[in-house]
Image (cartoon, rainbow, N blue to C red):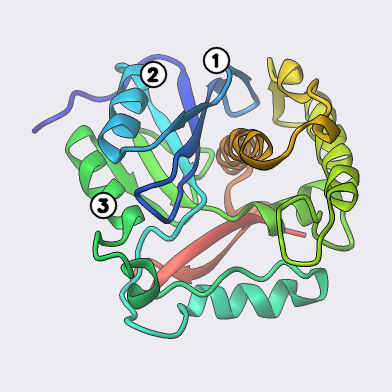
Amino acid sequence: MVCDPPIGPWSYLGLDLAWSARNPSGLAVLRGGPHGATLVEPPRLITALDDLVAYMLAQVGDGPAILAVDAPLWVPNVTGQRPAETALARAFRAYEAAAHPANRRLLNRDGTGVRGEQLLERLAPYGFLPVTCPEPTASGRLVTEVYPHPAMIALFGLNKTLKYKSRPGRDHNQRVAAWHIYQQHLRLLTNTDPSLNGHLAMLEPDVATLRGQRLKAYEDQIDALFCAYIGLYAHRWGEAHCQVFGDRATGWIMTPRI
């Protein structure tokens, strides 16, 4: 399939891709340009890859796009972890922002394949190309891998990662306190370069009233929103303000610089 050159405003897609095909993924869409973009509608929760791709294509239309995915996109190693995870852990260990190990045995434990690689395959016919880091001069449709935790350290000026996710030994009150900090930093992105707009209604829910699947659904939506912003940030600043761990051959993770 041959695509015409994309035209029109940029779409910045953020995808919190579930590692299992049984779980929904959060998908957010911003529209604008490298200096700022606006949330199109509340982030969606979508399970099937084909449905994710269909929604992305409907939102992008004929325009250019940057898709920032929180999930491994290229995993050639059967066991262990990619050099990207090793290098990122070395840089962000003091901030408790290391990434989970990514290998084919782990990501294909249910026999359905590596979902990030499958996503790239489905998007390739529509002109989406993987890149380690979008640049201000970028054009077309680009896909990159991101990781929210180190991005929060860099963009929010944190000393440690926010403990808003469910983990053994982490109680609800601790998570709620972290959520309040996360929400406040997202509100402040309206006044940054690049700016994020149209998202404040997403930050109104009182997370203290959310538990279980309701809180997990909200988490996936907000993380998708933040992934979209990371893609926007990379398009604004490129490698001048962003850092790539790993490479195209072994897998990579892109994040704003500290």
Mark nearer the N terminus (1 vs 2) = 1
237 left or right of 178? Answer: left
Quarter of the image with the C terminus is: bottom right
Which residue position is annotated with label 3? 118
Mark nearer the N terminus (3 vs 2) = 2
Which residue position is annotated with label 2? 59
Q: Splitting the image into 4 quarters, where does residue 55 fall?
A: top left
Give coordinates of residue 106: x percent, y percent: 39, 73
Q: Residue at x 36, y 27 (%)?
A: 56
Could you say whether the residue bearing mark 3 is in a helix, strand or loop?
helix
Kindly report the distance in space between the C-alpha atoms of the residues bearing marks 1 and 2: 9 Å
Query: In the drawing, what numbered circle is on residue 40?
Result: 1
* Label 3 neighbour load within 10 Å: few <14, some 14-19, many 20+: some
Residue 9 vs 26, above or below: the answer is above
* Label 1 neighbour load within 10 Å: few <14, some 14-19, many 20+: some
Give coordinates of residue 63: x percent, y percent: 36, 20
* Three-letter amino acid code of the residue under disc 1: Val
* Three-letter amino acid code of the residue under disc 3: Gln
Q: Nearer the viewer, mark 3 or mark 2?
A: 3
Mark nearer the N terminus (3 vs 1) = 1
Quarter of the image with the N terminus is: top left
